[in-house]
Image (cartoon, helix red, strand yellow):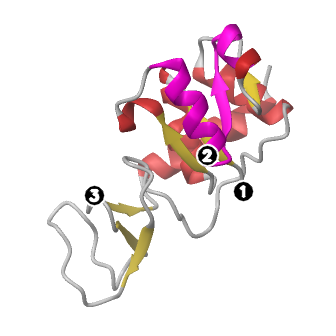
Amino acid sequence: MTRILLDTMCGGLRPYLRMCGHDAAYSLDRDVEADDELLRIAREEDRLLVTRDEGLAARAERALLLHSLDVRDQLRELRDAGVDLTLVDEPTYCGRCNGPLERVDGGRETPEYAPDPSAKRIWRCADCGQYFWKGSHWDGVAEALASLEEP
């Protein structure tokens, strides 16, 4: 999968990319807005910089310049540039913070809002502690990705 750095203008892509198995860092998750700092992170972490800023894209070693403001159109641009937008069977990155996800074993206690891990596959972020499972949000992302084929 692709290691990506999303600038401030592309944050809406985070959940989609992470649910497709991409290591998708987001500039504001790191409190970074300065172009030079974004370029440094992209270079040092070998990330594809995804941006809507033409000047920033021109200065990056590896960049994908998006043109649309709409997230679905941005997803189409990513797909057309060769970024795999297939949902993974086992999520690996937290949708909230991009931290690594760990599978929660059946019988382990979970928060009240999460399903029982003995009845449904559950993952927990090792960094922020958020719990994830394939529910309505997952279905919504799947539908949005499937709709990319429609005009």
96 and 27: which is toward the camera = 27
Closest to the observer, 102 or 38 = 38
Q: Is residue 130 above or below residue 64?
A: below
Secondary structure beneath disc 3?
loop
Taking the spot 77% from the left edge, 25% from the top edge, the residue there is 77
Residue at the spot of label 1: 1
Q: Residues within 10 Å of mark 3 (few under 14, many from 20)?
A: some
At label 2, the amino acid type is Glu
Label 2 sits on a secondary structure element that is helix
Q: Which residues are magenta?
A: 34-57
The residue lying at 56 percent from left, 45 percent from top is 24
Q: Is residue 130 left or right of residue 81?
A: left
- Per the image, the residue denoted by label 3 is 128
User: Left or right: 62 with respect to 74?
Assistant: right
71 lies left or right of 61: left
Percent position of residue 132, x then y: 37, 61
Q: Would residue 92 be counted in the magenta stretch?
A: no
Image coordinates of residue 1 in percent, x first then y, are 72, 56
Circle nearer the viewer, 1 or 2:
2
Against 83, residue 89 (above or below) is below
Residue 42 in percent (x, y) is at 62, 38
Q: Nearer the viewer, residue 96 or 61?
A: 61
Residue 43 on image: x %, y %: 66, 40
Are the residues flagged by discs 1 and 2 in contact, CB closer than 8 Å? Answer: no
Query: Of the residues shown, which amino acid type is indicated by label 1?
Result: Met
